[in-house]
Amino acid sequence: MPPALTDRDALQRFRARALRNPALFLHEDAADEVQERLEEVNRTFISPAIVTPFPQIWQNRLPSARLVPDDGVLDLEVGAHDLVIHALALHWADDPLGQIIQCRRALRPDGLFMGVMFGGQSLSELRAVLAQAESDVTGGLAPRIVPMGEIRDLGGLLQRAGLALPVADGFTRTILYRDFQHLVSDLRAMGESNALASRHKGGLSRAVLARAEALYRETFADEAGRLQATVETIFLTGWAPSDTQQKPLRPGSAAQRLADALGAVETPLEPAPFAAPRPAKD
């Protein structure tokens, strides 16, 4: 059994601490985007479920939804839902594929899965300066920020989970901070402190933090001196298989030529050049 990525006890403590003075604007932003995308689907969902570490974000958005914590085993009943949303928690999952499979099993045929998660470009600036600062000051490195997947790899999870019509897309945003401490405070207020199981329990020294802020200002500050932090949000969408879904035609089964449909003149490809036979070996 592979080692755990996340210290779940620490993660729960950090999330509880965040609620004392929360800064959940990225969760709010993701929830707004999900609602807009659902409106475009043009379907009424009557039994949704939402996997979320912060249920208060969703209580007034989808009032009929069942709110489920992002535990390793999700509290979802097989075939009970026509919509399952996994909201900004997959990056802390020890088994993201397993989480998506559990969501797919909870869907009725032709039910919709939508996963929202942070992508690999998130906090790229912070990763770079922390690694350089720690190396400069201590001569070593320790894991400080949870690894996040790239969009092409995350999209492949949908097919592996058995979802049909898979789509992966996303966008990046830049958040500006007046100083390094403001950025760190926001991460704590989102419950995104370092909860890696392999983390160094001692935290960062003042010398490392000072070096990191200096590097941040040298490399990633805008003209006004504000520190730039990139956040990539990735959306994974797929449908539980159903006989009613559209399916691609067999190759060669088209009843009409594309050139005719477009009103264009079809230009045939040049024949392949004739290859002279190889000379026989003696």
Image (cartoon, rainbow, N blue to C red):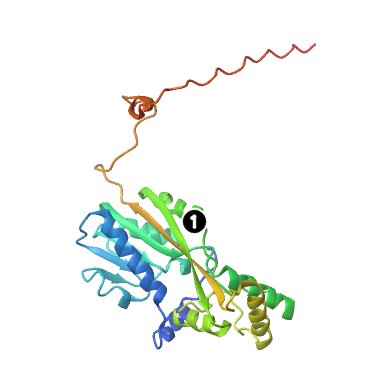
Residue 75 appears in the figure = no
Q: Is residue 134 left or right of residue 176?
A: right
Depth order, front residue of 123/78: 123
SS at badge 1: helix
Residue 271 falls in image quadrant: top right
- Relative image position of residue 280 (x, y in whole percent): 74, 11
Q: Residue furthest right?
A: 282
Residue 16 falls in image quadrant: bottom left
Residue 51 falls in image quadrant: bottom left
Residue 148 appears in the figure = yes
Q: Report the residue at 39% width, 85% height from top.
A: 19
Looking at the image, is 249 positioned above or below residue 38?
above
Reading the image, the residue beneath label 1 is: 151
The three-letter code of the residue at mark 1 reads: Ile
Q: Is residue 3 left or right of residue 242?
A: right
Depth order, front residue of 115/126: 126
Looking at the image, is 231 positioned above or below residue 24?
above
Q: Residues within 10 Å of mark 1 (few under 14, many from 20)?
A: many
Depth order, front residue of 166/41: 41
